Image (cartoon, helix red, strand yellow):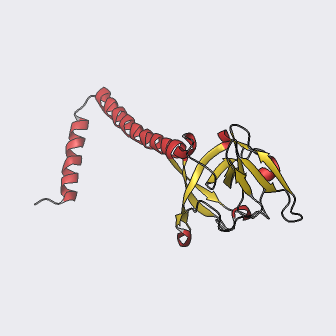
Amino acid sequence: MKCLGEEYMINLKLLRTIFYNMSLFQQWAFLVKEALDKSFLVAKFFCAIHVTDTYLFSTALVHGPSMLPTFNLNGEIVLLDRISTRYGKVGPGDVIIIRSPESPRKVVTKRIIGMEGDTVTYVVDPQNSDITKTIVVPKGHIWVEGDNIYNTYDSRNFGPVPYGLLQGKVFWKIWPTSAFGSIARRPQTVDPALKVME
């Protein structure tokens, strides 16, 4: 019985014999064909990664104080569902990743508080007063806030966010392993002054 290494050596010797018995043109054609086959295989792999990342699922690093206690300060790696945002399957209570309306190169993690047509009552400056305002979310927009109402920069500062800036819905924490699991739809603590009416 021949071992795998011997079979490989016999096949390599056979390939060399065939290669050296070819004309120079045939040798170049053989090499070009092999190179193109390998290049197309690599290109297909990267196309599949691009399509998956852009249209199906993606990963993101979320960090900062605005989403405490849902995410920690040091950062967590999460999975994003990009299909839900394309088909309008997100709603109040979902954690999402959006392009910042003020700095398009930046993406931020927030929780949806209201969808278009919802009436949202929010505390204007929770650290200094209990003054509230009420707004009706305009068509094609969403109202987002961070879970840590005392340390977040969100719709209370920059207003309703166009639905087109939604990048994906966060649905699973994958790193660190101690936080591995699904994302809760509602925050653990809810601001008592926050009211959403449809």
Of 31 and 67, which appears nearest the observer? 67
Hey, which quadrant is residue 195 in on the image? bottom right
Q: Position of residue 48 (x, y in %)?
A: 45, 42
Of 96 and 30, which appears nearest the observer? 96
At x 33% / y 29%, what residue is drawn? 29
Q: How many marks?
A: 0
**Among all residues in the image, which is located at the extreme bottom?**
178
Q: Is residue 20 above or below residue 105?
A: above
At x 18% / y 50%, what residue is drawn? 10
Q: Position of residue 167 (x, y in %)?
A: 62, 46
Res. 173 in view: yes
Of 48 and 171, which appears nearest the observer? 171
Q: In this view, does 154 lie above or below 189?
A: above
**Among all residues in the image, which is located at the extreme right?**
128
Q: Is residue 20 above or below residue 171?
A: above
Hey, which quadrant is residue 66 in on the image? bottom right
Q: Where is residue 123 in the image (x, y as percent from the top left)?
A: 82, 58
Residue 153 appears left or right of 98: right
The quarter in which the N terminus is drawn is bottom left
Res. 154 in view: no
Hey, which quadrant is residue 44 in on the image? top left
